């Protein structure tokens, strides 16, 4: 009987650790409740498929700027979808009291996206962060989708995961 109980406890621990994200949260995000929040994407550190950065990728794909705009719009919707009770208004509000800055570190060709999110006040002082996002992108039925679709799905999943983590603060 002890072996069965011990096996169950171990199985629950393994499954629980597999389901938990690897993100690390610092700071208190409850200050965002009921606030207008500026959302900014920072591509200054991005590595695209191990070959390009934000400055060189447009040579490969001239639609890169429009892809970034679409990804931004989709992710802002994903943030609000999960936490309607927060009363937050998120979007492009440069004069807002708070900013969520998505620092995109790396995007693999299949859309897997690695990012951090930094919370700052309107003076740029860091109030908190959620680091270590690692979200799968597209892939599709045949295992291949255009990079633009894969990236939009990957960054959308980062935003979706962010909103899930923010729930505990509201």
Image: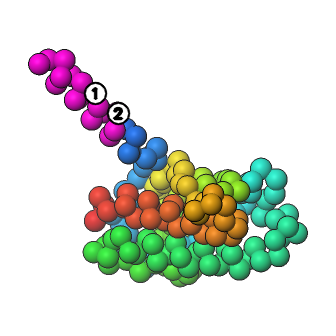
Residue 168 appears in the figure: yes
Please indicate whether residue 129 sits to the left or right of residue 137 in the image.
Answer: left
Q: Is residue 164 above or below residue 80?
A: above
The spot of residue 150 in percent (x, y) is: 63, 64
Inter-mark Cα distance, 1 to 2: 6 Å
The residue labelled by disc 2 is: 14
Reading the image, the residue beneath label 1 is 10
Considering every residue shown, the one lying at the far right of the view is: 59
Quadrant housing the C terminus: bottom left
Q: Is residue 151 visible?
A: no
Quadrant in which residue 30 is drawn: bottom left
Looking at the image, residue 148 sits to the left or right of residue 52; the answer is left
Residue at horizontal 70 percent and vertical 67 percent from the top: 146
Magenta-drawn stretch contains 147: no
Residue 19, position in %: x, y?
38, 45
Q: Are marks 1 and 2 in contact (CB under 8 Å)?
A: yes
Identify which residue is drawn at 48% across, 54% down: 129
Determine whether the residue tagged by mark 1 lies in a helix, strand or loop. Answer: helix
The magenta span reads 1-16
Q: Main secondary structure of the magenta part?
A: helix
* In this picture, residue 158 sits left or right of residue 18: right
Q: Residues within 10 Å of mark 1 (few under 14, many from 20)?
A: few
Within the image, what quadrant is residue 69 found in?
Answer: bottom right
Q: 130 or 126: which is nearer to us?
A: 130
Residue 13, magenta (yes or no): yes
Q: Secondary structure at mark 2?
A: helix
Nearest to the observer: residue 41 or residue 17: 17
- Residue 166 placement (x, y as % from top left): 36, 61
Identify the residue at image location x=62%, y=60%: 142
């Amino acid at each position: 009987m002890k072996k069965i109980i011990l096996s169950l406890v171990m199985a629950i621990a393994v499954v629980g650790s597999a389901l938990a994200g690897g993100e690390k949260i610092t700071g208190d995000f409850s200050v965002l409740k009921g606030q207008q929040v500026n959302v900014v994407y920072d591509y200054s550190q991005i590595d695209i498929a191990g070959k390009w950065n934000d400055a060189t990728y447009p040579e490969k794909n001239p639609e890169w700027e429009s892809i970034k705009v679409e990804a931004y719009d989709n992710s802002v919707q994903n943030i609000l979808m999960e936490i309607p009770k927060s009363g937050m208004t998120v979007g492009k509000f440069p004069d807002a009291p708070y900013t969520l800055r998505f620092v995109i570190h790396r995007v693999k060709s299949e859309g897997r996206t690695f990012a951090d999110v930094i919370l700052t006040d309107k003076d740029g002082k860091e109030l908190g962060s959620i680091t270590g996002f690692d979200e799968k992108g597209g892939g599709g039925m045949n295992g291949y989708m255009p990079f633009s679709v894969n990236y939009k799905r990957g960054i959308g999943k980062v935003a979706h995961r962010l909103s899930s983590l923010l729930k505990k603060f509201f």
